[in-house]
């Protein structure tokens, strides 16, 4: 039958993104829904807390590359090979939806795509013996009425902290809990490997929470009222919103 018998496979799309760490993680359900593909991560609009510099790319690239639907990860800007520039998701956040739904609406995809686990890790890093809770709190998106003091008292004997060293220092100083160990990680894949092994994640709307959401682990979330864009439909997450 000659060449007509050859089955041709359509090329997978290429994506680009310039957002913060969490923005990129929240984009993954949309990428998966389109069948996966390659992605370029690079500098973008001014105003994001963590612009995608080469240094930040090195931190997130291993986690993105570990996903089975991602064919390649590169540092760079969109070009003629880019099919979907995902930066337009910001236009959809005015509708007060979560960050994944913003990406899904941008591409006219079912919003239910973010209801199921979209992150995986090649292996789980065990937490220290007797530890099963992960704390994380960034310097952004903090509130005043989240019961951190109570939670530290309840879980300090079985918690670890995942995040930046300076975040750990600020957290333990504020809540007088230097006995809570710090889980040192070289990149976000290692952070995900720790989070994947926890029984409960407690944190604010930071990148570690985007990982907890992607893994669908049990979560308690400090919600930032001016931008509650990390609320998802699942029974094993509780969101505490500061009434102010």
Image (cartoon, rainbow, N blue to C red):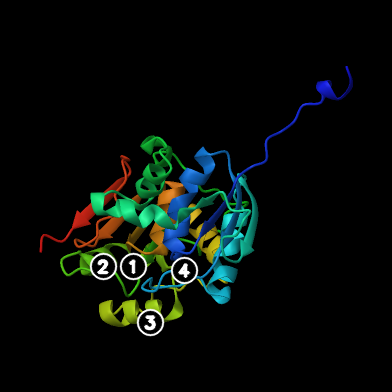
Circles 3, 2 touching at the beta carbon (< 8 Å): no
Please indicate, yes or no, whether residue 105 appears anywhere in the rendered image. Answer: yes
Question: Residue 14: which numbered mark, if any?
Answer: none
Query: Does residue 131 appear in this view?
Result: no
Identity of the residue drawn at 40% across and 43% down: 104
**Secondary structure beneath label 1:** helix
**Real-space Cα distance between discs 4 and 3?**
30 Å
Judged left or right of residue 122, residue 172 is left
Say which residue label 4 marks: 44
Look at discs 4 and 1 and give the one toward the viewer. Answer: 4
Check the image and report above or below for 206 versus 116.
below
SS label for mark 2: helix
Query: Earlier along the polypeptide chain: callout 4 or callout 3?
Result: 4
Judging by the rendered image, the residue that carries numbered circle 2 is 153
Marks 3, 1: nearer the viewer: 3
User: Callout 3 environment at 10 Å: few (<14), some (14 to 19), or many (20+)?
Assistant: some
Q: Position of residue 5 (x, y in %)?
A: 82, 21
Dot 2, crowdedness within 10 Å: few (<14), some or many (≥20)? few
- For the view shown, which residue lies furthest in the right direction? 2
Q: Are marks 2 and 1 in contact (CB under 8 Å)?
A: yes
Distance between mark 3 and mark 2 Cα atoms: 17 Å
Secondary structure of the residue carrying tag 3 is: helix
Residue 203, by quadrant, is bottom left
Task: Name the residue tied to disc 1.
Answer: 156
Picture coordinates of residue 3 (x, y %)? 86, 25
Instruction: Kindly identify which residue carries mark 3.
Output: 169
CA gap between label 4 and label 2 equals: 41 Å
CA gap between label 3 and label 1 equals 15 Å
Q: Which residue is painted at 36% across and 45% down in the image?
A: 101
Q: Total marks drawn?
A: 4
Q: Residue at position x 56%, y 49% from top? A: 83
């Amino acid at each position: 039958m000659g060449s007509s018998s050859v089955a041709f496979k359509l090329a997978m799309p290429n994506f680009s993104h310039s957002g913060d760490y969490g923005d990129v993680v929240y984009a993954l359900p949309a990428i998966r829904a389109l069948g996966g593909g390659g992605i370029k991560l690079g500098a973008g609009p001014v105003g994001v807390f963590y612009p995608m510099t080469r240094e930040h790319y090195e931190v997130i690239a291993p986690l993105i590359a570990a996903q089975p639907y991602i064919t390649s990860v590169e540092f760079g800007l969109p070009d003629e090979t880019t099919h979907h520039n995902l930066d337009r998701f910001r236009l959809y956040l005015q509708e007060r939806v979560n960050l994944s739904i913003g990406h899904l609406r941008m591409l006219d995809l079912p919003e239910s795509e973010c209801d199921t686990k979209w992150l995986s890790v090649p292996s789980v890093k065990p937490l220290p013996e007797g530890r099963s809770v992960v704390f994380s709190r960034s310097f952004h998106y903090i509130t005043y009425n989240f019961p951190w003091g109570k939670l530290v008292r309840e879980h300090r004997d079985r918690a670890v902290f995942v995040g930046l060293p300076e975040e750990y220092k600020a957290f333990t100083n504020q809540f007088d809990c230097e006995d809570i160990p710090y889980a040192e990680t070289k990149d976000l894949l290692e952070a995900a490997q720790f989070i994947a092994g926890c029984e409960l994640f407690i944190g604010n709307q930071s990148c570690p929470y985007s990982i907890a959401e992607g893994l669908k682990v049990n979560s308690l979330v400090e919600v930032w009222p001016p931008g509650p864009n990390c609320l998802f439909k699942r029974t094993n997450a509780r969101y505490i919103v500061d009434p102010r």
